[in-house]
Structure formats: C-alpha cells, structure tokens
Amino acid sequence: MALQAPEGTKDLLPDEAVYWTRFKAIATEIFGRYGYLPIETPVFEQTELFVRGIGEATDVVSKEMFTAISGENLKKLLDGGTVKAKSRLSLRPEGTAGVVRAVVQHDLVPQGAAPAKLLYAGPMFRAERPQKGRQRQFNQVGIECLGAEEPSVDAEGIIMLMRFYAAIGIPVEATRLLVNSMGCDVCRPAYRDAVKAFMDTHTDELCDECKRRAETNPLRAFDCKNPGCAAVMEGAPKITDHLCDDCREHYEAVKTYLTGAGLVFVEDPTLVRGLDYYTRTVFEVQVTEGMGSQNAIGGGGRYDKLAEEVGGRPTPGFGWALGYERCVLALEAAGHTLPAAQRCDVFVACVDDSVRAEAFSLVQALRDGGLVGEMDHQRRSLKSQFKLADKLGAHAVVVLGPDELAAGQVKVRDMQAHDEQMADLAALKTQLAACAVEGGAAALKDVLARLA
C-alpha cells in the first residue's frame, strides 16, 4: 500500500495551495492598512513557553501539544537521563505565545515606543481527534498588537477581521460576532471563586472533565460541549455582573466603537477562550449555517499579562487568529468554489520537431514579457497540442510551422473568439521584450494589438 499523509493532515494541492497564497496576500494587504507588519517565528519553541504562556491546565498544553525531540535526547530519556529545558521543544499549537516571545526577546516595544503591530500566517499543530474543520496540522492567520491597552485597539482588531471576512467572500449576514469581557486580576479571582462555588453545588451533574476543571480552571467549564454541563453552566454566575469599574468601562468602550463602525454583535457572558492568558475583551466569530458544531472561524482577545509570563516587562497586548481551513468551509457553505490554479496566456504549438527549438525560444520570450507561456514537452500531435492548450485555459495559441517560420511568420489563434491572424515573429519578440522592459505583465490582447 502506498504511504499516506499522516492522520489529521492534508496536502494542499495546486488549486488550494495557490488560494492559500492569495488568502495570505489579501490578509497582508488589508491588515497593512491598519499598520500591521509580517513576522515569522519558528514552528517549534521551548515547551516552557507554552506551559507558562498558555497555561499548564489548559487542554492545549495538557493534552494536545506535539513534543519534538532529537534522537540523541530520546536516547538520554530511554537510558534514564534528563534533557535540559532548552532542549524540551514542542510544535506550536497557536501563534500568540511565539510572537510575544519574539517581541520580548528583540525588545520590539521599548519604553515609550509606539505599539508593535504584527501579523503572521502558517501551520499550527494540535493532537486533536481529526474531524471536519479540525486537523492536527492546520493553518492560521493572526495578528498581535503589543504596547497599547486602549479599548480602541480591541475594536480596531475586531473590525479589521470582519473586513477581511467580507473581502474573501464570507457574507456578513452569514456570521455571528460574539463578545465578552473576562475581567482582570482585580475582579476575576472573586468571579472564579463564585463559579467554583456554584459548580461545587452541582458536582453530581457535571462530567468528570468539568469536575477536574472546577479545581484547576472553573471558567473553562463554560466551554464544555457536554449538553448536561452546558445546561448546568447556564445558571452559573455571569462575569459581566462581577466586572470592576475599569474593566466595565473598557468593555463599554469596545462595544461603543464596534457599534460606531456598524458591526452587529451579540454579548455572550459565557464566552471564554481556551487559553489562560486572556484578560478583558474576548470575542469569537461563528458561521450561522452549513458548518454544524465546528462553526467558529476566528477569535481572540486581550492578554495584558502574557509578556510578563514569558519574562518581559509589563506590556499590554491584543490579538486574534482565524483558521484557514474553517474559512474555506465557510466559503463553501456560502456557495463559493476555489478558483482553478492552472492559467496559461499563450501556448506555443509545433507543427513538427524542426521548429521545436524556435518554439522553446518563443516560450521563454513570452515568460520574460510577463505572460504565462507553455508548450508541449511530450511530442504530441498538433491536434493534441490544441487540446492541451484548451485544457490549460490558454487565451491564444501561437502555431509554428516550417513554412511559416521560413517566412518569419507565426499563426496566432484566439481561443475565445476562434479566429486566426498571421503575425511577424520578429515583431512579436520585440513587443514581448518591450513588455519586459516596461516591467509589467502585459495583457495578451495588448501585445497582439501592437502587432496589428
């Protein structure tokens, strides 16, 4: 049996790989309008970064992280030895911790400096049960803003994300924006105690996992998918009733900004994010139809203590991530299909082998002129070459034959209009060279118009 891709992973074949590239380009263009610049961090980090940053009690750290280890260190462990902390590595389960680590390490937000606005795109890894919309290797696009605690940063980030969804074709009316505040170190401890006390009175009605959460992180019980637990937690205390004055003021300001930008949102006091570093604003974007229970396509929030957790100075932060694969499912649910990757402007066809060298030269000239040029590499018949050109979606076919070549001519067939014209070969090459000098990918019709 032929080897298969690992469970929970998928190959991005050409059509989707080209779309993923375009997806990232749209993100870079839109987020760039808000001042966000690209950053690339390693796909693996010291395990301690995720333990300290995300939280040891979270499902992501306790159950889902992939640990990377060298053969030498594996041998040490098998022999009863130990591995240094710097050699304990894990594949990144999310992007925020690594970006914050980079900001701290390289001092991207020195005292008194403007916020660091950063965007990233790439693969993340979680050892989850594979299912539709949830893979063990998946792609995310995300942003992080470090160095500003104003609610305008939170609102700006959420607005930017919703603008992106609209730009790629996910209808606004097909989404639901949920917002909440998780409080801060002043008001959240008392709220956690209140939730734990509530859960302690309903222990017999909770699943084993939520019983464990009651001791480690009671707020995570709000995210339990067990219907019985969800019903119990509906009656739990709400964070919005326990916010301190500063958190309440911050939350109200975020909602005011969102409303002013014309965004419709739903306040969900049970909304929590699965990572421990969140403070104050949290939000999630869901698709309302066509994706079942796996309907979240993005979310995030504020994390004002994370920089300190990874060893930096106090630096407020806000960020979010969207799942690429989830967005593709949302687009499919909205009736979109991914565009075909294959594109060919001009196909150069050979009548026989005597003109193959000249055809090869012309194809290079086409490419140098900014056009997508192709030719037959399998010695097909002329009829088969036209079929191939049609399959590649060629706009025009340039036919080279020995008689035409002797006269310095080529035949050009417009594949859409189904008409033909003769063109001077030397003039064609000159015009293509001019296109290259001008530095643009000239439209084929413009090139041909110059020859008329």
Image (cartoon, rainbow, N blue to C red):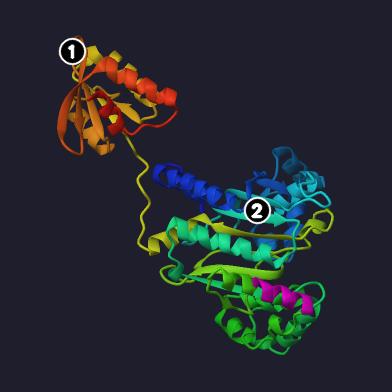
Residue under the image location 73 percent in, 55 percent down:
146
> In the picture shown, does residue 211 fall above or below 390?
below
Disc 2 marks which residue? 95
Mark 2 or mark 1, whichever is nearer to me:
1
Point out residue 345 in the picture as x, y percentages from the top left corner.
31, 33
Q: Is residue 129 magenta?
A: no
Residue under the image location 56 percent in, 58 percent down:
322
Left or right: where 296 falls relative to 433: right
Point out residue 47 in the picture as x, y percentages from the top left corner.
74, 51
- Under mark 1, the amino acid is Pro
Q: Compare residues 385 and 111 and report the one nearer the observer.
A: 111
Residue 408 can be seen in this image: yes
Q: Compare residues 109 and 289 and report the one nearer the observer.
A: 109
Q: Which span of residues is magenta-colored?
A: 244-254
Disc 1 marks which residue? 402
Q: Quadrant of the C terminus?
A: top left
- Under mark 2, the amino acid is Gly
